[in-house]
Amino acid sequence: MSNSEVMTISPTERKKTLKSYITGFILSIVLTLVPYILVTDHLMTPLILVGVILVFAFIQLAVQLIFFLHVKQESKPRLNLFIFVLFFCTILVVVVASIWIMQHLNYRMNLLQLSNVMQYGEGF
């Protein structure tokens, strides 16, 4: 392999990349510790706490995508971003459909059916 084939990174690009990784790491630590402290110290009601944790989770997702996966620095086709969005939508459909199915089954099964299934294995 000749020197012209090897991709070299300038010292300024290395510092920029290292700074990006350190910033992302510090933000990730903070975005993890804040919800942990909120949960362990019982500083909020459970319903508000779930909302706050979800907000911090989405911010954490954005930090991971920008600082570690470099989605913002992608070239024109943005294939990685498209694949990620498609993957996220697929997971969202699976989770929402699973919750809907479980709620529907919970609504349709009354206590008599549940007791028959538990005792005799019948009722379906």
Image: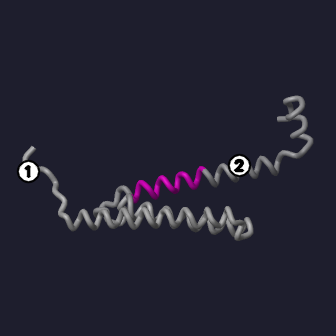
| Residue drawn 35% across the image and 61% down it | 70
For the N terminus, the quadrant is top left
Which range of residues does the magenta coloring cover? 81-94
Residue 122 lies in the magenta-colored region: no
Tell me which numbered mark, 1 or 2, is placed earlier along the sequence. Answer: 1
Q: CA distance from mark 1 to mark 2?
A: 59 Å
Which of the pair 29/104 is nearer the observer?
29
- Name the disc covering residue 3, or none: 1
Which SS class for mark 1? loop
As drawn, 80 above or below 20: above
Which residue lies under the disc numbered 2? 101
Residue 41: horizontal and vertical position, in percent? 69, 66
3 to the left or right of 33:
left
Q: Left or right of 1: which side holds 67?
A: right
Check if residue 82 falls in the magenta segment.
yes
Q: Residues within 10 Å of mark 2 (few under 14, many from 20)?
A: few
Whole-percent x, y for residue 29 in the image: 49, 63
Numbered disc in front, either 1 or 2: 1
Residue closest to the eye, 19 or 76: 19
